[in-house]
């Protein structure tokens, strides 16, 4: 790698311009540096899912929710040299809509590794597609994904109410 400075062009003053040779180098180009790309980054995603079954109660639903969370935590994506895995699954919210339906949401913080440093545009659609396919069925209760969005995107469909809905904030 070269780290020396080279002259790009020079200007010699006119002969009748005193003092002679006052201006010599007008522009130069510096040494070369290696650009370090960020090979690892985080993405924050919100997911929304429905829990359906007859007469839902916590004794039946909680074990299934723990299994579903474990399923999300164990998810791994490898596409070429790009890898993605959940770093943290948290901020669970729920709303019981009726005796047979509960709406839930969670945040997932993804750790993405891309040796080229440009995988964000390729990995986001794949993660959204894979998360929207997640489901779990056991006995008479099912969990089905309804939506997944990255932070800053618009939500679609029915999501659990936030704690501050209608509070004037």
Image (spheres, rainbow, N blue to C red):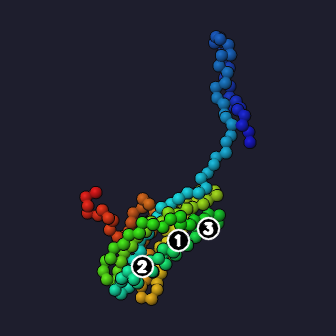
Q: Is residue 85 above or below residue 96?
A: above
Spatial distance from mark 3 to mark 2, Cα to Cα? 33 Å
Q: Residue at x 58, y 70 (%)?
A: 76
Residue 78 in picture, x, y percent from top left: 61, 68
Q: Nearer the viewer, residue 145 or 75?
A: 75
Residue where numbered disc 1 is placed: 73
Residue where numbered disc 3 is placed: 79
Q: Secondary structure at mark 2?
A: helix
Residue where numbered disc 2 is placed: 62
Q: Secondary structure at mark 3?
A: strand
Q: Is residue 158 above or below residue 139?
A: above
Residue 124 appears in the picture as rendered: no
Task: Decide which of tag 3 and tag 2 comes sooner along the chain.
Answer: 2
Task: Decide which of tag 2 and tag 1 comes sooner along the chain.
Answer: 2
Q: Quadrant of residue 4?
A: top right
Quadrant, the C terminus: bottom left
> Left or right: 126 with respect to 116?
left
Q: Is residue 131 above or below residue 6?
A: below
Mark in front: 2 vs 1: 2
């Amino acid at each position: 790698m070269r780290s020396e400075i080279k002259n790009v062009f020079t200007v010699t003053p006119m002969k009748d311009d005193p003092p002679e040779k006052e201006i010599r180098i007008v522009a130069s180009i510096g040494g070369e540096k290696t650009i370090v790309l960020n090979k690892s980054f985080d993405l924050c995603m919100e997911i929304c899912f429905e829990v359906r079954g007859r007469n839902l109660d916590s004794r039946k639903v909680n074990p299934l929710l723990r299994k579903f969370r474990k399923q999300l935590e164990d998810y791994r994506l490898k596409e070429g040299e790009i890898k993605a895995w959940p770093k943290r699954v948290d901020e669970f919210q729920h709303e019981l809509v009726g005796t047979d339906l509960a709406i839930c949401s969670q945040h997932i913080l993804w750790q993405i590794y891309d040796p080229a440093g440009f995988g964000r545009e390729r990995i986001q659609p794949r993660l959204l597609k894979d998360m929207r396919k997640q489901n779990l069925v056991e006995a008479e209760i099912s969990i089905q994904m309804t939506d997944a969005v990255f932070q800053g995107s618009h939500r679609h469909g029915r999501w659990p109410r936030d704690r501050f809905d209608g509070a004037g904030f």
